[in-house]
Image (cartoon, grey):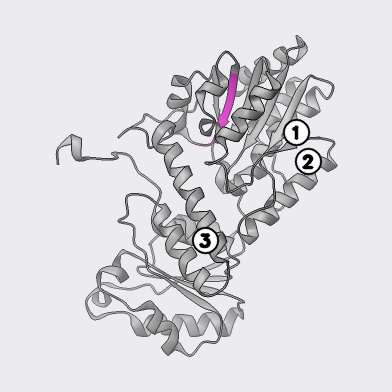
Amino acid sequence: MALKTMKYMQPRPSSIVAALYTARDLGVDVSVLHGPSGCSFKHARLLEEDGMRVLTTSLADHEFIFGGQQPLEAVLQYAERTFSPRRMAVIGTCVSMIIGEDLQAAIRNSGIVTPTIAIEIHAGYPENIAGVIATLEPAAAQGWISQEELERQKFLLGKANEVERLRGAASRPYIEPSRGDLKHVAAERLLSLLDSGKRGVAIMNAKKETAYMFADELLALHDARPAADITFVANLEERGLPKVREDARRIRTEMEGRGLDMQLCGALDEYGANGEALGEVIRSISPEFAFIVGVPHAIPPSALHGIECISVTNGPRQVEPLREQGHRIVVVEVDLHPRTLGVKNIVESELGAVIRSMA
C-alpha cells in the first residue's frame, strides 16, 4: 500500500472497545461480546472492575463457519438467570459481523425479559466513534436516552475527532510516544511561578472518568499554595449519559469539600468541543501562565499565545504535538486510565504527589 493512502500507522482505539465503554456509561450491567474469548480482553477485564460484567460467547474456529446463534442465546439466558441485570447489551465483533450473525434475533429467541440492545459493530472502522454511535442509536430506540441526547452525543464525538485530527494523536500517520518532562521539573516550575506572584489559570478539561485523577493535580496546586493568584476552571457541569453526570457530581463535590473554589466550563463528555469556550475564559483572565490537565490540545493555540503553558496528558503520543503548539512543559500521567476505573473518589496523581512533597 502506498504511503499516501495510509491514514494511520500506529495503533488506534477500537470501535468494539468504544461500544463497551458506552454501554457502561448507559448503565448496562452485563455486556456480552459475541466472538472469540480473547476479543478486547484487556478492556473487558478493566470494565469488570468498573461494575459492568463482560461475558463472551467464546466462539471457536468451527463456529466461525457454522455460526454461533445458539451459544449467544445460551449466554444471554445464563446472564439473566445469574446476575438479574437491569440492562444488557450484545456487542458484535469482527467474527460475528463477518459471518452475518443476527444479534437481534438471538435476543428475541433467547426468551429473556431484561431490556437488551444489539450493537452491530466490528473493529474495522477507521474511527472508534463508530462504536459509540452504534451503541447510542439502539439505546435511543429503546428509550434509554432521548433523541436530543443522541444528537448531542454525535456532535460531541465529531468535535472530539476534529481536535484529534487537528492537534492530537491522529494529526499524522505516526507519532513517536514519549513520557514527557520529569514531574519534579513541572512541579518546581509551577511553584516558582506562584511564589513569584505570577497570575495563573489552572484548567481541567478531562475526558470522562480520567477526571478522577486529573482533578487531583488542581487540588495539589491549591493545597501547596492556597493563597496564590490562580483561577481554577473545570469541566464538571452535569450533562451527558448517566455515569458521566454522576462522576461530575462526585468529583465537583469532593473538590469543593476540600476547599477548592472553581469556575465550571463544560461537561466531562464535552472535552473536545470545549476548546473555544475555555479560550474565552483564558482571554478574560489574561493570565501569565496556564496549567492545563486532561485534553490540553482542545484549547486553540491562539488562546495561549504569549502565555507560559504547562500541561498534563495521559497520552504518550500527545507530548510531541503539544510541544509543537508551544507548551513549555508537558507531563504524562502513565497508567492513569486503569487507575480511574471503578473509583468513586479522587485518586492521587504522580504529579500531584510530587507537588505536595515539594511544597
**Disc 2 marks which residue?**
255
Q: Amino acid at mark 3?
A: Leu
Numbered label tally = 3
Q: Amino acid at mark 2?
A: Met
- Residue 232: which quarter of the image? top right
**Disc 3 marks which residue?**
150
Above or below: residue 238 compared with residue 101: above
Q: Quadrant of the C terminus?
A: top right
Which residue is painted at 64% across and 46% down in the image? 267
Q: Are marks 2 and 3 in contact (CB under 8 Å)?
A: no
- Stretch of the chain drawn in magenta: 309-314
- The disc placed on residue 320 is none
- Residue 16: which quarter of the image? bottom left
SS for tag 3?
helix
Work out whether residue 73 or residue 141 is closer to the camera in this orientation and state it: 141
Indicate the position of residue 324 as horizontal and vertical percent values: 44, 20
**Disc 1 marks which residue?**
219
| Residue sitting at the far left | 1
SS for tag 1?
helix
Indicate the position of residue 289 as horizontal and vertical percent values: 65, 17
Which residue is painted at 60% across and 52% down in the image? 341
Q: Amino acid at mark 1?
A: Leu
Indicate the position of residue 273 as horizontal and vertical percent values: 54, 41
Is residue 310 in the magenta section?
yes
Distance between the Cα atoms at labels 1 and 2? 7 Å
Q: Main secondary structure of the magenta part?
A: strand
Residue 232 visible at all: yes
The disc, 2 or 3, on the residue closer to the chain's N-terminal end is 3
Indicate the position of residue 154 as horizontal and vertical percent values: 48, 54
Which of labels 3 and 1 is toward the front? 3
